[in-house]
Amino acid sequence: MTLAAVAALACAPAALADGDPASDVLPSQDAYYPYQPPVSKAVVTALNNELKQVKDAGYPMKVALLQSAGDMGSYPTLFNQPQRYADLLSSELPTQRDKQFKGALHLLVVMPGGFGGENLGDNVDEALAPVKINAAQQSDGLARAAMLAVARIATANGHPTKTPPEATASSEKSKSSGGGGGGSAGLIIGIIVAVLAIGAIVVVLLRRRRVD
């Protein structure tokens, strides 16, 4: 067996030792997306474009979206423990050896239960405080929260970034749905008023018959 083959065998276990999909994806991509359910294409495009924007502005970020324990690989017990997983993930990523990072990695982890991160600045808690994760939207909810979080974190660290409109698209839809609900309530009220009016007319007619 050649020395090269021995070296390859020696390195193989170390390369696979991390056991979580995000650590395999993020060295070559800016975001790890959940397997199931998949994030909507428009939302994926918006988050990818935002991450490219902040990278071009000098604040490269990596984002890991983890919707279920299935996204955790060998670490299912860390699901919904975003900061503990962020600590682990940041230790697995080759930040200093990766040429695209000319310094420490800015890592954001998003789970239905909250955010975790590494090297996101002194004002990260303040930046993330208003950002809510809509768990009912599942993977799309994580991605939309990530868009809001990335914009606020980059801005808080001196790189003003606008939030993509796709981050709030669901809110607009909810407002529309709410309007529809109001219309249904109005219809019910209208029916009740009509029934009462008919009742009043019947009472008047009955009284006239008695008088006649």
Image (tube, rainbow, N blue to C red):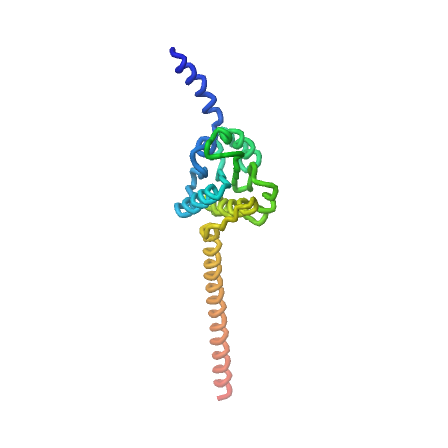
- With respect to residue 187, does 161 lie above or below? above
**Residue 16 at what x, y percent from top left?**
45, 24
Residue at point 45% right, 24% down? 15
Q: Quadrant of the N terminus?
A: top left
**Residue 6 at what x, y percent from top left?**
42, 14
Residue 78 visible somewhere in the drawing? yes
**Residue 53 at what x, y percent from top left?**
45, 45
Quadrant in the picture for residue 119: top right
Residue at point 56% right, 40% down? 120
Name the residue furthest bottom: 212
Residue 66 visible somewhere in the drawing? no
Left or right for 118, reference 15: right
- With respect to residue 64, does 131 lie above or below? below
Which is more toward the observer, 69 or 158?
158
Which is more toward the observer, 192 or 136?
136
Name the residue furthest top: 1
Q: How many marks?
A: 0
- With respect to residue 148, does 8 lie above or below? above
Residue at point 48% right, 52% down? 168
Which is more toward the observer, 14 or 132?
14
**Residue 61 at what x, y percent from top left?**
49, 39
Residue at point 53% right, 45% down? 154
